[in-house]
Image: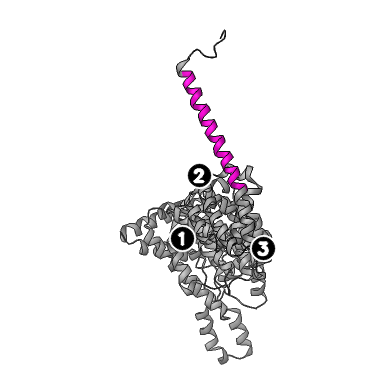
Amino acid sequence: MAENYASSDSESNDGWPEFTYYAKKHKKKEANGAFNDDYDEDETEEVNHHYNDYDEDEREEVKKVKPKKPKVTLVEAAAQIDASDLEAFLGDISAAFKEKDDIQMKRFSDYFERAFSPVSASQFPWVRVLKEVPVRRTVYAPLCHISDAVYKTSVNWINHRSSEGLSSFMLWCLDSILSDLRIQLNGSKKAVQQIAKFIGLAMVLRRKPDTLISVLPTLRENKKYQGLDKLPLITWMVVQASVGDLSVGLYAWSQNLLPIVVGKKSGNMESRDFVLQVVEKILSTPNARPVLIGAVRKGKQLIPPRAFETLICVTFPSSNRVKGTEERFAVIYPVLREVVLCGSPGSKAMQQIFSFAIKAAGENKNPELSKEAVDIVIWCFSRSTKCYKQWKNVYEYNIVASVAVLKKLSDDWNVQATKLSSYEPLREILKHFRQKNKKALDAAPHHAHFKDADKYCKIIAGRVSQGLGCKAACLTFAVLASAVVVLYPNFGISGF
């Protein structure tokens, strides 16, 4: 898949109006004296140390001669990076630190740290940007300022680094950025400029997106990477990886972001909005559907059964706790459903899907959820006859769901019959169900659910028999036709 790394003016201008706004706002604050990152703290302290030793006129002179750092914007600093100089530097560190990719990656980051050292933290207020600017635009930050030549030189070099070294570098950058986040959340104005870390992360995630998969368990299980305050940064990382490989982005979304939606502490409107923005960005990519359907990552489905269950629950919510975003989930659900059902889930995954679907099919208080679950149950029958055995084991305990499935097969037989690969397993299971129905009705003659179940079993059994009869007749006709062709090769020629 083509990488969207180009730092064209159109991307930068279209994607970054908010960033320009923040830069101007901070510049105005500096001019008004709200804060100023352009002073060298050590030199200012030295001047202030002797400040009281001067009279009033001399103090005015001292104020005038305060040394200032030259003002350099992010764009200007990025433009000064020379690709050939970077290439020579990367060659040197590769030779100096052979087979030590983690050290090489840190030296790589140091190069960009030096390049952006004159730029103040206010030039890239990442906490506000990632929180307040839409995800579809933060995907360009801050990589849009890097030239194509510098980007290509960097990612070509990154491509030869080991997965272990890149994973270590990714967590190292993330820890540094989160350390700055803690400083800012504590109210300190001494934010640490993080441009180089963001650029390094973006390049790794775009060129080697599988690196994100290797750290997903750490991001999921380590508490220092959890919490709503870290969510904007984690979503930014997932979107960066999706630029390099859509399937990695969707896999990371289903594994680490989707569960946040139903979390007791994390499942609020703001977090759901972030989670939805990520998947909406992924699915809005041209040709996303054909790329994602049938794709797997490291032998795993992009949306595993547990994530699929969560997706169904938030698309057809029973609880008010997840309501408010169901319309947006309803828009993306059909494609994500295809990603799950049009793939090739293994037998274990199939059993898990059937297990939660047969339970959800009995949700009388949520008819939309029940309807969707019934369709999924019938799909399971079409993909694996083992699901009939699962149904046999839970039939009595999920009689409401079983009646819903039987009713669907009965009422919509002409359509549903075409989805079943074989009628024989269904005929056998119907015989078993009729025995169970009889036993239940003998014990409780007025049991409405078993009465309905037995009615639908009779109807379906009759249609299955007709279908098997038609198939047998068609087979007999095909055999006879073949025999005629063999015995009478001239049969059908004109003049007969």
Q: Which residue is mark 1?
A: 212
Is residue 147 something that shows in the picture?
Answer: no
Residue situated in front as seen by the camera: 163 or 452: 452
Q: At x 46% / y 63%, what residue is drawn? A: 112
Judged from this view, the residue extending furthest toward the top is 495
Picture quadrant of residue 400: bottom right
Q: Is residue 44 above or below residue 254?
A: below
Which of the two marks, 3 or 1, is nearer to us in this view? 3
Task: Give SS at disc 3.
Answer: loop
Q: Position of residue 241 (x, y in %)?
A: 50, 57
* Image color mode: one colour
How dense is the environment of label 2, judged by Cα within 10 Å: few (below 14), some, or many (20 and up)?
A: few
Q: Is residue 472 magenta?
A: yes
Q: At x 58% / y 74%, what residue is drawn? A: 264
How dense is the environment of label 3, judged by Cα within 10 Å: few (below 14), some, or many (20 and up)?
A: some
Which of the two marks, 3 or 2, is nearer to us in this view? 2
Helix, strand or loop: magenta stretch? helix
CB atoms of marks 2 and 1 within 8 Å: no
Q: Position of residue 453 (x, y in %)?
A: 61, 56
What mark, if any, has residue 366 been given in the picture? 3
Q: CA distance from mark 3 to mark 1?
A: 37 Å
Identity, as a three-letter code, of the amino acid under mark 3: Asn
> On the rendered image, what quadrant is the C terminus found in?
top right
Judged from this view, the residue extending furthest toward the front is 442
Which of the two marks, 2 or 1, is nearer to us in this view? 2
Q: Is residue 403 above or below residue 46?
A: above
Task: Give SS at disc 1.
Answer: helix
Query: Which segment did they paint magenta?
Result: 459-485
Q: Position of residue 54 (x, y in %)?
A: 58, 90
Q: Which residue is mark 2?
A: 424
Q: Is residue 393 magenta?
A: no
Q: CA distance from mark 3 to mark 2?
A: 32 Å
